[in-house]
Image (cartoon, rainbow, N blue to C red):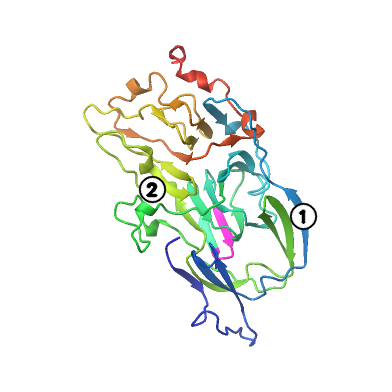
Amino acid sequence: MPRYVQLGELPKKHHIQFRKPDGSLYAEQLFSTRGFSGPMSTLYHHNLPTEVSSWEDRGSVKPVYLDDEPLRHRHLKTARMKPSGDAISGRIPLMGNQDLEWHQLWVDEQMEHFYKNADGDECLFIHDGEGHMDSLFGTVHFKKGDYLVIPRGTIYKLHFNSLPVRMLAIISYGPIEIPRRYRNEYGQLLEHAPFKERDIRVPSELPVHSERTPTQVMIRARGRHTLYTHPYHPLDVVGWDGYVFPYAFNINDFQPITGAIHMPPPIHQTFAGHNFVICSFCPRMLDYHPEAIAVPYNHSNVDSDEVLYYCNDKFGSRKGIEEGSITVHPLGIPHGPQPGAVEASLGAKRTEELAVMVDTFHPFKLTQNALNIEDEDYWKSWSPKTS
């Protein structure tokens, strides 16, 4: 995140003595990315972050992908899923590749343990519900429509005001960043960017837990879960500063870019990952050329998979989808509006669609979980006889 933030108490300089009221030293921790060459933050703990009481291996969490699936458009109906688990144990992997994993959740339990993902950055989309995230960097409140971007290695716990809650979890093996074309050379968001710094909600409170209470943290690393027990509360940070921290951004704060004729999907880009993008399709005015066609043209994505998660059922170029649907349009075959959608769009002035899209530059592989909720007739919806 190309933005400096500080919260809590700090010494005058890095790497100097910083003492508690009783005269003992706080423990300084450098939280760095890309070795010592990327964004970093510095945190000050009551306890040594290296102190561990015990650990327990909890086994592999690597998704099991299907290697020999036929090439076709797919419609996954997440409404067929049942509420289960918490924000970690309830993650159901639907697809992934060498760059990212897509997990679907319908959370019906509060988190039992703190969590740290050392395998990648996380982007959590809150479909419904609200609550707050307690983290190493402080508290971030979240609500319906929020993206929560959580850097690799952040200890956190989500608390929901009510349950169940539908969520989407993208785990990126590389950093999740704001697109470079939205930023100037100093990292500031430019005037043409579809959101600004004030739309990004950083940690605003820093509750300090100095008590020596045994606390457990589930750590994901190398595709396995390990449950660590520390003899203290891990959120014992009295202050921090830097460029690495979790934050929230609401999909409804995205400012759609419109034009006289239909604009391409990159205008909806919200975040950039390694070999993939995350886009937000939001309510907006439609194309205003007098002869405009207000739905997308047919598109051959010869080197990219397109996956859409629908937050409502108002997507003009699709039929048969419902709130919570996922469509998977793989590379190698064209996709576009179903029969009748173009004619139905003529003269439309506005759309109320709301969806999250992930485009990848390596093919997604599906899991059996995805096939279990598939509408197997979706590919037939481009046949004129089904219109």
Image position, residue 87 (x, y; %) = 63, 49
| Residue at image coords 55%, 20% | 377
Q: Is residue 2 left or right of residue 260?
A: right
Q: How many marks?
A: 2
Quarter of the image where the C terminus is located: top left
Which residue is rendered at x = 39% and y = 29% of the image? 299
- Residue 14 in percent (x, y) is at 52, 79
Position in image of residue 365 (x %, y %): 59, 35
Label 1 Cα neighbours within 10 Å, binned few <14 / some 14-19 / many ≥20? few
Instruction: Look at the magenta stretch and give its main secondary structure.
Output: strand
> On screen, 8 above or below 162?
below
In the rendered image, the quadrant that contains the N terminus is: bottom left
For label 2, the residue is: 254
Three-letter code for the amino acid on which mark 2 is drawn: Phe
Disc 1 marks which residue?
A: 57
Residue at image coords 48%, 31%:
331
Query: Which label lies toward us, 1 or 2?
Result: 1
Circle 2 sits in a helix, a strand or a loop, which is it?
loop
Q: Does residue 293 lie above or below 127 as drawn?
A: above
Mark 1: secondary structure: strand
> Are the residues tagged 1 and 2 within 8 Å (C-beta)?
no
Q: Position of residue 346 (x, y in %)?
A: 29, 24
- In the rendered structure, does residue 303 fall within the stretch colored magenta? no
Judged left or right of residue 366, residue 384 is left
Instruction: Read off the magenta span.
Output: 130-138
